[in-house]
Amino acid sequence: MNPSIATLIYGCGIAGLFYLGRDKTIHTSKALWLPVAYLWIVGSRGPSIWLGLTPPAGTDVQLDGTPLDRLIFTSLLFLGLVVLVQRGSKVLRVIRANWAILAFFAFCLASVVWSDFPEVASKRWIKAIGDLVMVLIVVTDASNPIGTFRRLISRVGFVLLPASVLLIKYYPALGRSYDAFVGTQFNTGVTTNKNTLGVVVLVVSLGALWCLLDILRSKDLPNRTRLLVAWGTLLAFGMLLLKQANSATSRGCFVLGALILVASRLSAIKRHPRMFQVMLFVIVVGGGLATLFGGDIAHAVGRNSDLTGRTEIWNVLIPMSPNPVVGAGFESFWLGDRLFEVRQAFRGNPLNEAHNGYIEIYLNLGWIGLGLLAVLLISGYRRAAAAFRLEPTLGNLLLAYVCVSVVYSVTEAGFRMLDPIWIFLLLAIVASSAVTARVIQTADASVAKTPSPSMAGLPALRIEPRRRAS
């Protein structure tokens, strides 16, 4: 098929997905388009890459980025902050409830002081704040978090996933790439890397499966058939792209997340919540071990190299940390002479991550950063588990995102700014605290509005303690 005709067909198909997936019962603000646009960029390529713009002569993209990308991210951050200021007290309540995230970001900011590149680190920290700003916009957007999540996932997925299939099949110069070190071809879709494509498809496909399962259970839902077609099509695109991306970590994590979403709906699990906790532990630990020992990252170090295993990468990187306690500084390890030394150690391979989120945090923030990350993950899991008990319909998705993020980062650097899995981890944690607070507040309000017997004109009941028989 001619690429132009294919583009027209796919464009009409994307418009059709938006039409089929519309739900007039969901009311969200126009501000939700800010995190949608943010995820479109984070989940694909920078605007300068799409436009084919080259940075000015003498610009170090690794240190300075590109002017256009910087302008767009700064604009989105500014507009996001304006929205949050307008939402005032609601935002402050959510922020105060997530002290673990605040502590982690505060230490990241403090680490700028001892970075070898403080100006670059400070700019990257400001950019990382954009992740949190977009998360807060989503969480505080409306009183219907389930509808907000559905709209966010649909707007992101209906564009990125079909567009990736289009580029891979009809525009191979854009949708495919070659490993410069090995020469192997791989599919990238709208992204620049197969692992990035895999993680984008992972977070969207989990959301699509979650929504599809809820629609299947809702027999009386208006326009149910139309919604099933829309979300089923999105999930089908996700399954196709997970295969085409050939990212074993993303595929394995999708299976783990799907198990959580399906198992949480079983009646036996609802009757025995502790059984679900045990099952989650087995899934996370088993999935982490399978991911750690069952894969291959030869694409990261070169198939013709002797360094074909994760442990060999980590053995080289860990001793290179400039300070085991506080690390190299926020997002500063892969800069300057260290980057040159790493690439020399790996025979010129353009390695730019540790392929392990926990080691990546250690290299940049040291043991203190790892400790704060552990607190963030434990707190996030507890909040997601509480949200699942109080609001199972949304809580199971939040719990799946938290657990999948933990496993995904065993072999990929998932705890990094502008990474979809990191953004959805933050979103799951912050949304869990908001769901818990809202349910408790609603319950308290219901109790307060319920008239007591004395208020209803009846004599107050006095309950005497039961006396023990002699």
Image (cartoon, rainbow, N blue to C red):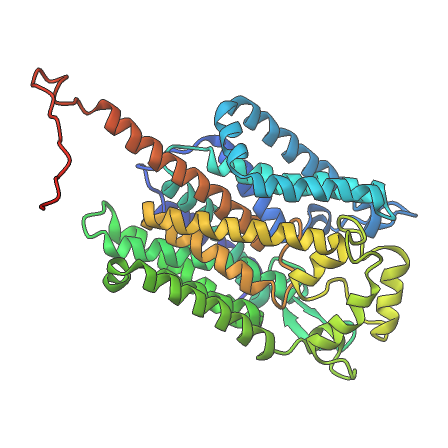
Q: Tell me: 313 left or right of 148.
A: right
| Residue 207, horizontal then vertical, whole percent | 43, 54
Place residue 302 in its image quadrant. bottom right
Q: Nearer the viewer, residue 454 or 369?
A: 454
Which residue is located at x 37 percent, y 45 percent? 19
Q: Nearer the viewer, residue 276 or 259?
A: 276
Q: Tell me: 235 left or right of 346.
A: left
Place residue 73 in its image quadrant. top right
| Residue 354, horizontal then vertical, whole percent | 72, 65
Residue 230 seen in the figure: no
Which residue is located at x 51 percent, y 32 percent? 31
| Residue 394, horizontal then vertical, whole percent | 37, 48
| Residue 391, horizontal then vertical, whole percent | 33, 46
89 shown above or below 107: above
Residue 189 seen in the figure: yes
376 shown above or below 440: below
84 shown above or below 274: above
